[in-house]
Amino acid sequence: MPISRKIIDGVLCAMFCLGCVQQVRPLPADPQAGTLWTNSIGLKLVWIPPEPVREVGRDWATPQIAIRQGFYMGIYEVSQRQYKKVMGSNPSQYKHDNCPVESVTWYQAVDFCALLSTMEGKTYRLPTEAEWVHACRAQSTTTYFFGEDASQMRKYAWDKHTTPQFYLSDMITFIIGSPAEKATSSWGFPPRPQPVGKKKPNDWGLHDMYGNVREWCQDPYEPDHPERVLKGGSYEDDGVFSCRCENRFRCHPENRCMENGFRIVLDLNESFSWPSSSLNARFFKSAFCLP
């Protein structure tokens, strides 16, 4: 039986009174490119200004849609710590609070956005593919957002050429380091996700747009088909080819894959609406800060 709106309103009030949701500063009145804002779960977002998408040399049939409204986008992929704060669980195969949440279905990513929207009374969602490409390129007109020199990819992306890196220091850390240090050591492990924000960002301050985990988008890969678009490539892909802004991946929305994660956008142009009753149980669990 669905939980009534009045009960949810009461739970929201209790959340604020008990401190389950942090008070955050208001959104800037007139954001510019690069304006940062942090939400209630410590997720940092940056303002992406509106502008038509004109990608030079695009050779895939990706949407070329004018981005007429600006939006906020997470500067990092959603981390496992942030996912647990909202959903109360962590589906990731490789557990590390600062690594991107992975092995999430498209539906789980959408549920995260809906529940976070309910907690804050704002509209969070997955980016459209056109928004993702626009944010990734950050007004660049070159093959990669950092230029034409593909050898620079390692500075910006965790891909199969940059993760893991087997150094002697990694082996020593893995053998004698603390549990926290061992968790971040690359020695003795196959390629895997890396902590967010360790590579250089693009000109709008977005990290890991290339590599680390592929990112779910809102769009279907093809009209009238269930598969959804993923962007950005992963730690197991060749960054020079797979991590280009225009490259597309597809996956069924119910599939779990260790290479798949997501980042979110905050839509200021869409009115907040209450999520479906299918989220009520998860909402109640999160609202009362239950494990």
Image (cartoon, grey):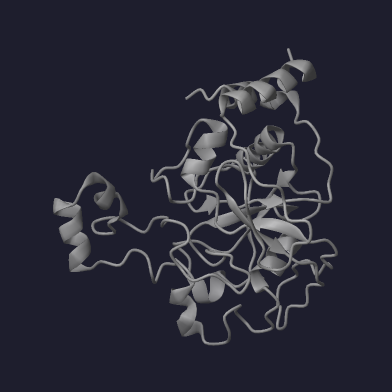
How many labels were placed on the picture? 0
- Quarter-of-image position of residue 173: bottom left
- Expressed as whole percent of the image width and height from the top left, the position of residue 235 reads 45, 62
In the image, 287 versus 212, the foreground residue is 287
Q: Is residue 185 above or below residue 272?
A: below
Question: Does any portion of residue 287 appear in the rendered image?
Answer: yes
Location of residue 61 with respect to 143 vertically, above or below: above
Q: Could you tell me which quadrant the N terminus lies in?
A: top right
Expressed as whole percent of the image width and height from the top left, the position of residue 191 reads 36, 59
Residue 164, position as x, y percentages in the image: 33, 63
Give the side of residue 13 with respect to residue 213, left or right. right
- Of residues 229 and 270, the one nearer the viewer is 270
- Residue in the foreground of this view, choosing between 69 and 277: 69
Side (left or right) of 200 relative to 148: left
Above or below residue 108? Residue 66 is below
Across and down, in percent, residue 136 comes to 64, 68
Confirm whether residue 282 shows in the render. Answer: no
Compared across the picture, whether 68 is left or right of 199 comes to right
Residue lying furthest top? 1
Name which residue lies at 39% across and 46% down.
96
- Identify which residue is drawn at 70% across, 25% down: 278
On the image, which quarter does residue 32 sit in? Answer: bottom right
